[in-house]
Amino acid sequence: MNRIPFIAGNWKMYKTGPEAVDAAKKLASLCSDVKDVEIMIAPTFLSLPLVSACVQGTRVKTGAQNLYFEKEGAFTGEVSADMIKAAGAEYVLIGHSERRQYFGETDETVCKKLRAAFHAGLKPVLCIGETEVERDQEKTFQTLDKQVSDGLKGFVSDELKDLTLAYEPVWAIGTGKTASTTQVDEVHQYLRSLLSRRFSADFSGRTRILYGGSVKPENVKELMNIRDVDGALVGGASLDPDKFIKIIKFYLQEI
Ligand code: PEP
């Protein structure tokens, strides 16, 4: 099954509006000759409409880092899926480990957010991953199984055609520790078969599974060579366009 590589940048709580626009413009111009790679950046909510406008018509697409599942209402400080869509975004990250760790995100809220995203016509990137303690206790697969099963509870595969999964071991995010190719291979194969068992082989074969966790120009090619890795979700190394472009052009890198 042909899955187009997808390289996504999570800009977290970095860059003011003007800084985000500058970086996005630079990235868009560096990406003009990229072929067969889908590219997305997720700036803060405040920068999202500005960045979406400035990359319009280029290879770079935009996404939000989170959403709130209600359509509208008295939910001070929150942003709905429709608002994100209207800001020009195509994607939204859901269930990022920092949301789970610091903001009380649960598999139940993840599930509601996914529903809201699909309803608004956004393409969600569902982030999952085990903590270091869970890995040490050999609970990696159990954790991922629960995050996928509960996060996608009640969905049928037809509703999930625009879903992307991102495997991000929590212990590898922003730490400089990358999971080994053996670890990544093992987990991505597990997730591929989990999607097949839970939905269908066809759905599993069509769904992109990204790896995230200290991806950089030096390790991206090796990671992308793993059969079931369809792309990368990149934090720190996506902030600098000169660095991020090397990840986007992973096919030019040496191992
Ligand atoms: C992330 O924020 O999703 C991430 C993977 O961060 P980093 O690349 O900095 O580890």
Image (spheres, rainbow, N blue to C red):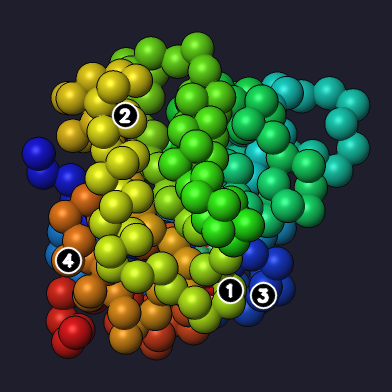
Residue 159 is drawn in which quadrant?
A: top left
Side (left or right) of 152 relative to 113: left
User: Given this view, does label 1 or label 3 mark the residue nearer the observer?
Assistant: 1
Q: Spatial distance from mark 4 to mark 3, Cα to Cα?
A: 32 Å
Image x and y of residue 187, in percent: 34, 50
Neighbours of disc 1 within 10 Å: few (<14), some (14-19), many (20+):
some
Q: In which quarter of the image is the N terminus?
A: top left
Q: Quadrant of the C terminus?
A: bottom left
Residue at disc 3, CB closer than 8 Å to ligand 1: no
Neighbours of disc 3 within 10 Å: few (<14), some (14-19), many (20+):
some
Circle 4 residue:
225
218 or 9: nearer the eye?
A: 218
N-term mark: 4 or 1: 1
Which disc is residue 174 wearing?
A: 1
| 1 and 3 marks in contact (CB < 8 Å) | no
Q: Spatial distance from mark 1 to mark 3, Cα to Cα?
A: 17 Å
